[in-house]
Amino acid sequence: MMNLSINTIKQLIKYLSGIENLSVGYDSGDDVIHDFQQYFLFRDYRQDELRYTVEEALHDGLNALNKDKLLFKYLNTRIDKGLFLLNEKVNFQKSITILNEILFQDGYIAFESETGSYEIGKIDKNNSKEEYTDALWALADDLRHRREQGEFLTYEEAYIFGSKHYTHNGAEIKPLSLRNEWHKASSAGRV
């Protein structure tokens, strides 16, 4: 079962409230509460008695779900591609990338399953990075292509992602190394 740190919960509140169009946010605190009611939270809530902001409702709900070990189930409902189709401003792939940056620190990641849907799973802490065996400039080129597809806002963000998710021949990768290797390959006409 999932158990997230206080810092991760704080980042999830920002993410789920739709700040900067990072995810499909809620329109009101009432919408958050309605979404959480299936988990038996806010049972005694009456709209006329108390007003919650989106952030307050998310804070109370996420902390309660985290304590009750139901957070995993809730987060899996929030990464349904169908939700993202309703809001054209939000890039689904970019949203998954940002969610992974948030969850990675506590050992979780959202991944595409064999059925094509996304789900959250635990990362093996001993093998949390993927080994990249091709040339380092090739990884940088792959990451640059993903940026051009809209997954990252900048090339630097793509390189940072690469350094957090890949090793090269068993060694850590620095974002600056990815940038330098790509520029060398570009000068040599390999890309």
Image: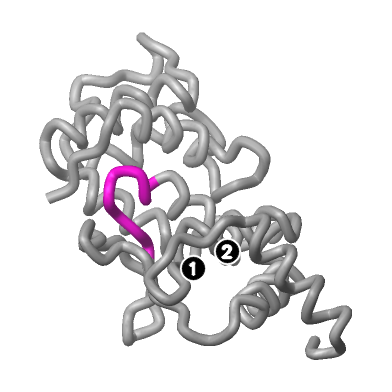
The vertical placement of 150 against 46, above or below, is: below
In percent of the image, x 63 and y 60: which residue is there? 159
Secondary element type, mark 2: helix
Label located before the other in sequence (1 or 2): 1
Please tell me how crowded label 2 is: few (under 14), some (14-19), or many (20+) other residues with Cα within 10 Å. Answer: many
**Where is residue 180 drawn, in percent x and y?**
74, 65
Left or right position of 152 against 112: right
Left or right position of 113 against 125: right
Quadrant of res 25: top right
The vertical placement of 85 against 36, above or below, is: below
The vertical placement of 133 against 122, above or below, is: below
Q: CA distance from mark 1 to mark 2?
A: 7 Å
The magenta segment is 103-110
- Quadrant where the image shows the C terminus: bottom right
Quadrant of res 166: bottom left
* Residue type of the residue flagged with mark 1: Lys
Residue linked to disc 1 = 81
Residue 152 seen anywhere in this rendered image of the structure: yes
**Where is residue 168 drawn, in percent x and y?**
47, 73
Asked whether 72 falls inside the magenta stretch, the response is no
* Residue type of the residue flagged with mark 2: Phe
**Where is residue 11 drawn, in percent x and y?**
45, 33
Tell me, for residue 92, which label it has, or none: 2
